Amino acid sequence: MREWWQGTLLVAGRSLAEQLRSRTFKVVTGMLLLISAAAVIVPQVLGDDATTYTLVTVGEVPPDLAGMLESAQTAGDFAVEFETRADRAGVREAVEQGDATAGLVGDTLFTSSQADGTFPVLVAQAVVALETSGRLSEAGLSPDEIARVQGVRPPEQVPVSQVADEGRAGVGFAVGIVLYLALTFAGSGIATTVAMEKSTRISEVLLAVLRPSQALVGTVLAVGTVTLAQVLVLAVPMAVAVRVTDSVGLPAVATGDLTLAIAWFLLGFALYAFLFAASAALVDKI
């Protein structure tokens, strides 16, 4: 058994050296590194600016309304800016031209059809809450009673989906994509290497001193090692970004799911890699 592994490692070392010297390996690895770096850098560049909404009114915005919106911006992770115009037409024009997200004039709320609808809904709810509070006060309710009325909570929202656990499903989908990409590059590399060695009669020299299983396993180990290195080039920058920043969002999964995903990836890669090598061995000699 020791001699078998020694011969297998010799074949793997020779094939690995050829793979690392090839131009294809250098080009593909460079492209994967650029893709991984772009996946980390682009979200940071595009996501640096916080979402900012602008409310335009005729004259100064009511202090109570401004206070409610400023309180909401802390919890909602956005910023609110206030602008004024001289009349109703100016408010409408500001919204039409995109200078403001929403415009409030009396009982009218101007909104842009192309803007995010979240902020106008928030403004409308704040106006309704203030108007309700004023009418309840006029009806003779005390501040504590008004607070209890406005403290009624909406129904609890329970998100549902066709997938029982979206995080685990996302990991499985990602593993499938990575396995497909790995087999696309590694499978063609294994098939090309085996077919070339057979067509150039290098395999005859190897088989004169080695067993067919040694040549097969050695070639698969070499190309698999190269593929693993390329996968690490793609994954390591993203993993570092996840640990350091929040720019790359990944689903929260248990360690057991990740371990199982890696195990299935290795088993799937080994199965298809040997099938590629066996199929390439059927190529006729030139």
Image (tube, helix red, strand yellow):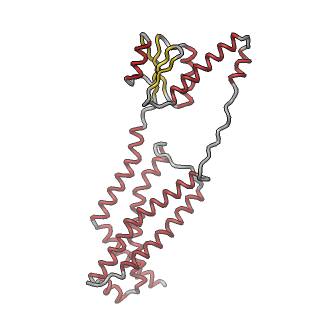
Tell me the quadrant of the picture where the C terminus can be found: bottom left
User: Residue at horizontal 41%, vertical 86%?
Assistant: 211
Q: Is residue 60 above or below residue 73?
A: above
Residue at the far bottom in the pictured view: 208
Q: Nearer the viewer, residue 99 or 43?
A: 99
Q: Nearer the viewer, residue 206 or 248?
A: 248
Point out residue 149 in the picture as x, y percentages from the top left corner. 71, 22
User: Residue at horizontal 47%, vertical 31%?
Assistant: 116
Point out residue 65 in the picture as x, y percentages from the top left corner. 56, 17
Q: Is residue 211 above or below residue 40?
A: below
Q: Is residue 216 above or below residue 17?
A: below
The quadrant where residue 44 appears: top left
The quadrant where residue 71 appears: top right
User: Residue at horizontal 51%, vertical 17%?
Assistant: 108
Q: Nearer the viewer, residue 82 or 250?
A: 82
From the viewer's perspective, tell me whether residue 41 is left or right of residue 65. left
